[in-house]
Image (cartoon, rainbow, N blue to C red):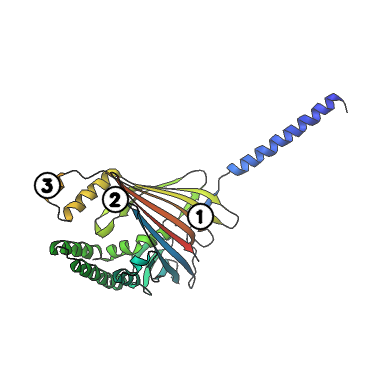
């Protein structure tokens, strides 16, 4: 073969390699879309292990609860789901030996919480909220009894009772409280996600003890969609600083702080949620999810991590 023929052959091979590389690169860069709308059938159920870990000032507490979600009804309008909790147990043997911890851990055991969900996976209401409210009334009584036993001032006990009673006084308040962890199973549903652009949205975060909501901005990013239809999403959600400061000041006032205490500007606070979801696109059921909430106020940081793992 002449030298010119060698050159042509080498050039042809190089061009072939470049073309193949370009095709592969283009294929990887093509848009991938994951549609995460629920496709649930009546009678279907999924079992999860719910794990919660709270860390503050060097102290970490972890609890574990089995949760079952069943599709009781599936219609053109939506779904009726039954969420049933097992016993909640903490990993710390000393804490688990506390009678109050054990009573609170079993107070919802075996109770069906009836969730009315639309076709997009958004929870509309808790149908048996009055049943749930009665259980929360027992929780308030148990906590009040413990405060009295430990010699808490009557005024403090009364304020706590009032705050908790307000938090569980209506269907909307019950839904917010019941859905504190369960809502994570529904957060990514009802949308299509593209691999080429994040999905951004505005929302409100309910706060503990019925102290209103905080405005926040959320974002989902589709990071993977495998051959089995499992979509992986990265999630961030950040509370608006001004909204968080306003609610913090209102909470201090509601807790009966003195005029002098209320005159002192509260320490600036930040609240950030991060998480990862793996969702079965064929059914709309999350397979795994991990959510971490970090609250920072001055030198103090509190981190709460919640995860659901399908069993």
x%, y% of residue 114?
Answer: 37, 70
Q: Residue at x 25, y 55 (%)?
A: 212
Q: Is residue 253 above or below residue 264?
A: below
Q: Residues within 10 Å of mark 2 (few under 14, many from 20)?
A: many
Q: Is residue 42 left or right of residue 12?
A: left
Q: Residue at x 34, y 60 (%)?
A: 180
Tag 3 near tag 2, CB within 8 Å: no
Residue 260 got which mark?
3
Q: Nearer the viewer, residue 73 or 65?
A: 65
Residue on which disc 2 sits:
214
Image quadrant for the N terminus? top right
Q: Please tell me whether mark 1 sits on a helix, a strand or a loop.
A: strand
Q: Nearer the viewer, residue 251 or 94?
A: 94
Disc 2 to disc 1, how far (Cα)?
Answer: 28 Å
Q: Please tell me whether mark 3 sits on a helix, a strand or a loop.
A: helix
As drawn, the residue found furthest toward the front would be: 94
Looking at the rendered image, the disc whose residue lies closer to the viewer, 2 or 1, is 2
**Earlier-in-chain disc, 3 versus 2:** 2
Which quadrant of the view contains residue 124?
bottom left
Q: Residues within 10 Å of mark 1 (few under 14, many from 20)?
A: some
Disc 1 to disc 3, how far (Cα)?
Answer: 53 Å
x%, y% of residue 76?
Answer: 45, 67
Q: Is residue 2 left or right of residue 41?
A: right
Q: Is residue 128 above or below residue 279?
A: below
**Earlier-in-chain disc, 1 versus 3:** 1
x%, y% of residue 151?
Answer: 17, 65
Residue on which disc 1 sits:
35
**Earlier-in-chain disc, 2 versus 1:** 1
Q: Residues within 10 Å of mark 3 (few under 14, many from 20)?
A: few
x%, y% of residue 254?
Answer: 17, 55
Q: Residue at x 21, y 61 (%)?
A: 163
Q: Is residue 305 above or below residue 196?
A: below
């Amino acid at each position: 073969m002449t030298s010119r023929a060698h050159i042509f052959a080498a050039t042809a091979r190089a061009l072939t390699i470049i073309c193949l590389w370009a095709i592969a690169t283009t294929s990887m860069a093509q848009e991938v879309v994951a549609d995460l709308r629920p496709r649930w059938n009546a009678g279907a159920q999924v079992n999860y292990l719910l794990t919660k870990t709270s860390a503050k000032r060097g102290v970490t507490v972890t609890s574990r609860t089995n949760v079952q979600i069943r599709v009781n009804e599936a219609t053109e309008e939506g779904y009726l789901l039954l969420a049933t909790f097992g016993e909640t147990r903490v990993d710390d043997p000393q804490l688990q030996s506390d009678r109050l911890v054990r009573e609170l851990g079993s107070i919802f055991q075996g109770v069906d919480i009836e969730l009315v969900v639309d076709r997009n996976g958004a929870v509309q209401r808790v149908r048996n909220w009055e049943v749930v409210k009665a259980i929360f009334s027992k929780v308030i009584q148990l906590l009040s009894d413990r405060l009295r036993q430990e010699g808490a001032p009557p005024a403090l006990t009364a304020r706590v009772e009032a705050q908790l009673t307000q938090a569980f006084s209506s269907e909307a308040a019950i839904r917010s409280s019941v859905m504190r962890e369960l809502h994570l199973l529904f957060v990514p549903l009802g949308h299509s996600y593209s691999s080429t652009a994040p999905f951004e949205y505005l929302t409100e975060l309910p706060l503990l003890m019925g102290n209103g909501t905080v405005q926040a901005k959320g974002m989902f990013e589709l990071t993977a969609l495998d051959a089995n239809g499992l979509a992986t999403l990265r999630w961030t959600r950040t509370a608006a600083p001004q909204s968080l400061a306003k609610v913090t000041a209102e909470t201090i006032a509601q807790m009966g702080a003195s005029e002098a205490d209320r005159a002192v500007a509260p320490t600036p606070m930040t609240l950030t949620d991060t998480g990862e979801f793996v969702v079965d696109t064929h059914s709309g059921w999350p397979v795994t999810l991990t959510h971490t909430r970090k609250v920072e106020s001055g030198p103090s940081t509190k981190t709460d991590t919640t995860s659901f793992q399908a069993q």
